[in-house]
Amino acid sequence: MFTNLIKRGLAALGLLSAAITGTPALSRETGPALWQISDKDTTVYLFGTIHLLPRDSRWQTSKFQQAVQNSQSLVLETLIDTANPQQLAGIMAAMGFSSGLPPITERVPPEKRALLEAAITKTKIPRPMFDRMETWAAAFTLLGVQFQMLGVEGEQGVEAVLRRSFTASGKQVGQLETNQEQLGFFDRLPEAAQRELLVGAIDNPTEMRTKFDGMLKSWLAGDVKDIANTFNADLQGSPELKAALLTRRNYSWSQWIERRMNQPGTVMVAVGAGHLAGEESVQRYLESKGYKVKRLQ
């Protein structure tokens, strides 16, 4: 979805994306991590994604391309109807605005208020609207400006590239969650956790670029351990965020894969890289149920 790291920790969830100047070179020996779960008549490929990338990013290896070719369908976290953006905007408006909220400046520490006002000005959105936005919605709105400044685009992200590829080949593309379900994870967060997101959304762009630079390099190298360490450290101080955005969803997705293993065929499941790293990853849940998860790259 368009959520991608608001902080480095959220990036781990694929809810935010890596952003850097230029793109690190992908060596022939490495590539983003790819796994396989299979039995006699079913194969599920698991691929960790980054939702936004700079133009001309190079991340596809021959092994990954073979997995794409083998796959009869693709499943992503969610599907955004780019031909009908009003649909998502309507969901956002219904969930993201409320009356009786405190002014937006009162929802960040005093020392962050100047940064917040500067970020709001860059959006070109009428200032009073932000006082009516729920805190998580304001964070998402401000992130859009940050991403523009970082030079990353959803159309260059892994999901968009894969969706175009599978659609062009006449293959089915599905989703694990609806847009409304994804936004609901944030809408239900305690206000304190939402304010953490808002503060993260107004970070200095230079600082954000540095954080994402390391994240993207780890992703390109398939360094799952580093991704896990980063995400665990960043989410450690916010159990509400970790539960809502990571662990509950990982468990739910592992159950979906279990059910899918009962149907013949080959499918690629592509979700945010942070969901496929660490002790509470999708793979660990599957392994606890007796499935053998094989890493291909």
Image: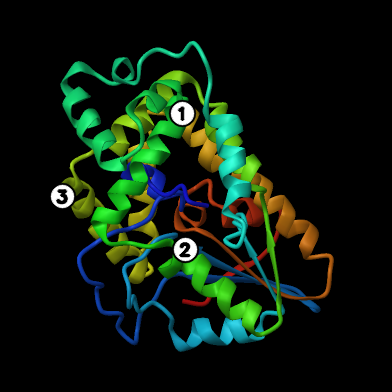
Q: Looking at numbered disc 2 in the image, what kind of residue is underneath it?
A: Thr
Q: Earlier in the sequence, mark 1 or mark 2?
A: 2
Q: What residue is shown at x 35% (from left), y 15% (from top)?
A: 103
Q: Looking at numbered disc 1 in the image, what kind of residue is underneath it?
A: Pro
Q: Which mark is residue 144?
A: none
Asked whether residue 248 appears in the rendered view, the answer is no
Dot 2: within a 10 Å radius of its alpha carbon, few (fewer than 14), some, or many (20 or more) residues? many
Tag 1 near tag 2, CB within 8 Å: no
Q: What's the distance in space between the residues labelled 1 and 3, CA to CA?
A: 27 Å
**Res 287 quadrant in image:** bottom right
Q: Position of residue 251 (x, y in %)?
A: 64, 45
Q: Position of residue 276 (x, y in %)?
A: 51, 57
Residue that label 3 marks: 206
Residue that label 1 marks: 239
Q: Position of residue 171 (x, y in %)?
A: 71, 79
Q: Is residue 129 above or below residue 167?
A: above
Dot 1: within a 10 Å radius of its alpha carbon, few (fewer than 14), some, or many (20 or more) residues? few
Dot 3: within a 10 Å radius of its alpha carbon, few (fewer than 14), some, or many (20 or more) residues? few
Position of 199 with respect to 275 (left or right) is left
Q: Earlier in the sequence, mark 1 or mark 3?
A: 3
Asked whether residue 229 appears in the rendered view, the answer is yes
**Res 81 quadrant in image:** bottom right
Residue that label 2 marks: 49
